[in-house]
Amino acid sequence: MANTILIVEDEIKLANLLSDYFKLTEYDPHMIHHGDEVITWIKRHQPKAVLLDIMLPGKDGIELCKEIRQFSDVPILMVTAKVDEIDRLLGLELGADDYICKPFSPREVVARVKAVLRRSQPSVNGKTVIVLDEQRFTASYLSKEVSLTSVEFQLLKPLAGRPGCIFTREQLMHNMYSDHRVVNNRTIDSHIKKLRRKLTEISQGEDLIQSVYGAGYRLVLE
């Protein structure tokens, strides 16, 4: 599921059309037609990006976007049938990465998703400094690569997605284990220590993961 694009759209013909276009790219589309199924699926499969229609049966797109942002930084592109709706959505500060208005060209949607995914890569002075490869469980820093375990990769993923932002141990634990197991703080700290050691090997001794006393951890790219 590493390159999965989740299409949340109740218009089945439109969802199928978008799916066909994404199948021509390096991404694998998955469709959901009911809002109530979205949260559980995302937590279980962790897609690369989410194309989220506002008008859905069950939970609507606005409610879903708010819920997703409570546990994930996955890129979200909101889809609306009304041009003036976009201003209202921006005012709500939902945390979406882009907004698309119907009717649209499927090619444009694919291009917008690719653009959002490119922007989601952390960069300094316009240059990508950390690149994560979900298929090989590797992280690259300034063109130097290190192999990670699956747990280390899932631990680094949210930190790399939002450099400078503090993540609590509970938030990191939720990303690390897809089965939502409960582990203690020492387990998180142990994995952080190992991840730090690996990143130090490719960063010329720079400590990229910073401990924030009483709060959690953050990735520092300065």
Image (cartoon, helix red, strand yellow):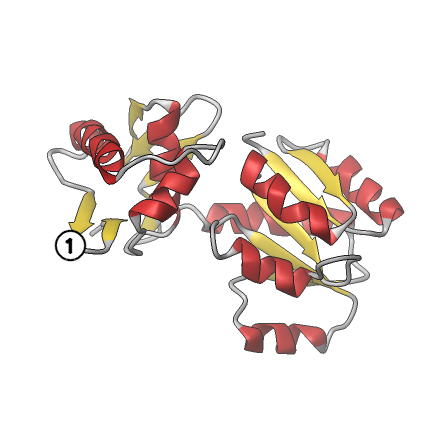
Residue depicted at x 37% and y 31%: 153
In the rendered view, tell whether residue 84 sits above or below residue 126.
below
What number of labels is visible?
1
Q: Position of residue 188 (x, y in %)?
A: 27, 36
Between 130 and 176, the residue placed more toward the observer is 176
Q: Position of residue 25 (x, y in %)?
A: 66, 33
Residue 46 visible to an observer of this rendering: no
Residue depicted at x 36% and y 40%: 173
Quadrant for the N terminus, please: top right
Residue depicted at x 72% and y 78%: 84
Q: Position of residue 135 (x, y in %)?
A: 48, 24
Outermost residue toward the left in this view: 205
In the rendered view, tell whether residue 183 sits above or below residue 118.
above
Q: On the picture, is 164 further left or further right than 70?
A: left
Mark 1 = which residue? 213
Does dot 1 land on a helix, a strand or a loop?
loop
Residue 17 visible to an observer of this rendering: yes
- Amino acid type at mark 1: Tyr
Q: Position of residue 73 (x, y in %)?
A: 47, 51
Between 93 and 203, the residue placed more toward the observer is 93
Between 81 and 125, the residue placed more toward the observer is 81
Between 29 and 191, the residue placed more toward the observer is 191
Outermost residue toward the right in this view: 13
Residue depicted at x 33% and y 29%: 152
- Report which quarter residue 77 is drawn in: bottom right
Q: On the picture, is 64 further left or further right than 157?
A: right
**Mark 1 crowd level (few <14, some 14–19, many ≥20, 10 Å Cα):** few
